[in-house]
Image: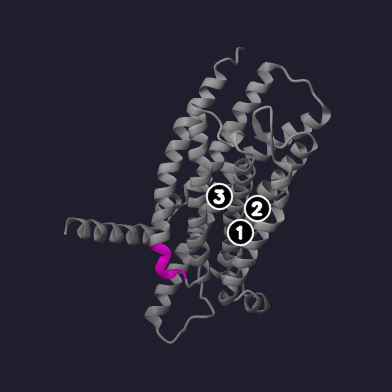
Amino acid sequence: MSTSLLPVIQTELNRYGLSIIFIFGTIGNSFIIILFRKYRQKSCSMYLFWSSIINNLYLLLAIPPTLYSISYGDLNSRSLTYCKLRFYLTNTLGQSARYFVILVCIDRFILTTTNVHIRILFQPKNARYLMCITFLFWHIFPIHILFSTTIKDGRCNQFGLYYILHNIYLIIFVCFIPLILMSIFGYLTYRNVRRLQLRIQPIDYPIDNHRENIIIRSRERELLYMVLGEVFIHIITILLYPFILLEIAITTYMGVLKSVDRIRIENFIVTIASVMFFINIGSRFYIFFVISKKFRKNFKKFFKLFCNRVIR
């Protein structure tokens, strides 16, 4: 079977697929930033608010240069400084947003657990510290990217042993650890909810007003479903990425001689995995819109208010 058409399909998939993801992703994340702005003092909303800001920065830094390189040549290969910084910043931003989602999962688990010691340890007031620690860690830990990335034969990448080690780093810290942690805390949260029969009551809210209490439980329950939906989509869209990276790392380490057809197939699968990876980053708003009735209601309210201001 001929694979000569795969590079053409790959190029078009990058051009149109990434363009659509960039447009709808930045718009969706911007809506989340606006809608969660007034709730960002709450731990879960705070994580979602800041991770959406970081996701927009990530999309802005990752996709437009890729689209530019399709028609006008790779920008990364023209400047060593830009080459290193782009690899480094896309990694730090992506990891920060990704591990903020893990903090959201932990937050939802804590909300539904009956273990008093865990709830005291992870109080909402500590959310800012956890975010700062996570953000700083993912700006320090991947500092090795600045040293291992270089330009060779007109390509900006890691080469030799560094290429294998970088793929292993991506497999472990970008793919497997987030997948495992999200799956564990997502399952534990779902189990706790089943045990509590959805009777969720945060410990830091007053209980003297019954009507207010009902509203708070409803909002927290909606946030819980939204987070579980995002975790489910994240697992589906990222599953292919670690396996193709693992295959490339192993065959490169073993020195396997690859045919032109095999290289084309590998590159095509990498493109599909990368597009799915970006879908995961740009789909949060649409996941929330489908899952949560209250989120749809708030968005419609905001949209009507915005339209009225524009008309006036």
Label 1–label 2 contact, CB within 8 A:
yes
- Disc 2 element: helix
In-front residue for pair 261/293: 261
Compare marks 1 and 2 and give the one earlier in the sequence. 1
Q: Which image quadrant is residue 183 in?
A: bottom right
- Residue 116 lies, with reference to residue 6, above or below; the image says below
Marks 1 and 2, Cα distance to the nearest angstrom?
7 Å
Residue under label 2, please give it: 178
Q: Looking at the image, which residue sits at the far top?
A: 1
For disc 1, the neighbor class at 10 Å (few under 14, some 14 to 19, many from 20) is many
In-front residue for pair 27/183: 27
Kindly identify the amino acid type of the residue bearing the numbered disc 1.
Ile
Where residue 199 sits: x, y (%)? Answer: 50, 72
Residue at 65% x, 31% y is 155
Predominant SS of the magenta segment: helix
Label 3–label 2 contact, CB within 8 A:
no
- Disc 3 element: helix
Compare marks 1 and 3 and give the one earlier in the sequence. 1
